[in-house]
Image (cartoon, rainbow, N blue to C red):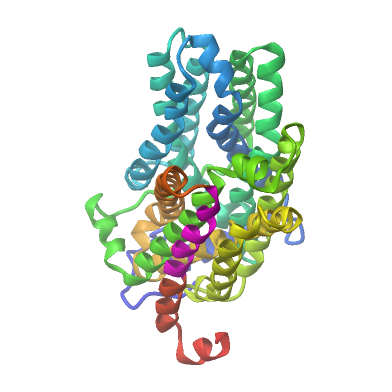
Amino acid sequence: MTNGSAPAPQHDPHDPATVSTTATTATKAIKPDRFFNLPVTILILASFMLGMSEFVVVGILPDIAQGLKVSEVTVGNLVALFAFVYAPVTPLGSAISARFPRFVTYLTLMGVFLAGNLLCALAPNYPVLLIARIMIALVSGTLVAIAMTYAPDVTTEHYRTKFIAWVFSGFSIASVVGVPFGTWVANTFGWRITFFIITGLTAVLMGLMAAFLPRNSHPVTIGFLRQFRLFFDKRIWGGVLTVVFGAGSSYVFYTYLTPIMRDEIGVPEQYVSVGLVLYGVACLWSNLYGGRIAERGRGVEPLARTRPIFCLHAILLCSLALASIVPLYGAVLLVALGMMMYLFNSASQVLYMDVAAEAHPGSMNLAASLNSMSFNIGIALGSAVGGLVNDHLGLTWLGPVGAIFSVGAIVITTLLRRAMPAKTAKMAA
């Protein structure tokens, strides 16, 4: 990472030089040619559990509604509430957690996550379930942010972007494997058993964390409010807005993916679940290949290079209006859109972490939380716009309206190129 212009406090663990030293020390215990060591695998599994707990409600929504004797709309509100709590709390929780020992903080928050899922399993009524979901939302984003800060301690610099991509991919794997499994369990044994399984697996995972995660701490030496000086950096806002527009462009139509497959493309009801799995596999590929994109430079470079991707995304979204006319094209198009859904994730995370390391070393935890925050804002915004479009214009217009969000991402990534070195920007063009 590039050193900043101002000298960092002595022994600041978030100073790039210190991070490099830490990474060198960690490398002695980690085989340079082996990425999937035990600590890395544990952190990926943690993302899987976070994703499964967050997404499984969608699959078992009818079971919960029937079990608690409330409407499906009422239970569906849990999804929106989760994102509403997740987005603003994540940066605040990450900034607060930076002042405490990382290992203890991470296990403590995992304990809250475990308790929240156990409370979901035992909830006697909807208000208790609501409290449990809020508990999980309060800690999930901060857990992802802290996991990102483990990168220099559990793997080598060579695998940094691969680590970021796989941590994000834990959520995609959860949507492909975890949610269908949780739904099957709920349909076969009851929805409470699904949450009991999540709780049990989390307990096992916490035991592995206690045994194998590094115990070195990186508490910041600056005040809570001073960490938020990170937001005075225009490059950070460029990253945040790109992710908001990028996520919004996909979630305008993704929120209504099932009706699109069923009503626009004509997928038979019994094969819709197969279509969702195929889309999930495409999303998983998107996350993993996004790690390859993030390796193409430092700082703002990888995200600025995603401009052509957003251009293609806008064109494909506009053509989604043809899905009902040419169903086969619509089916192939949905897979292509899934393959583009998360291509910017790792690149944006690299931007946040590199900019913080260079100019705001005391804000590393906060920087690590920004992708989760931005993406959830995009989810909320895209879903809300998608609902309005579906109600007033119909499913056919979801793609073209989503393309407007992609145009916003094109504008921001164009502006990010101005922050790149002139020679690099010329090569990227």
Magenta-colored span: 395-409
Quadrant position of the C terminus in the picture? bottom right
* Residue 154 visible within the image: yes
Q: Tell me: residue 25, above or below residue 8.
A: above
* Residue 160 visible within the image: no
Q: On the picture, is 81 further left or further right than 288?
A: left
Say which residue appears at 46% left-offset and 59% top-offset.
Answer: 243
Say which residue appears at 50% left-offset and 31% top-offset.
Answer: 110
From the top left corner, tell me how far across and down residue 185 is, in percent: 70, 19
Say which residue appears at 38% left-offset and 44% top-offset.
Answer: 87
- 215, 164: nearer the viewer: 164
From the top left corner, tell me how far across and down residue 10 is, in percent: 35, 64
From the top left corner, tell me how far across and down residue 414 is, in percent: 44, 78
Quadrant in the picture for residue 368: bottom left
Q: Tell me: residue 307, above or below residue 58.
A: below
- 350, 307: nearer the viewer: 307
Quadrant in the picture for residue 346: bottom right
Quadrant in the picture for residue 184: top right
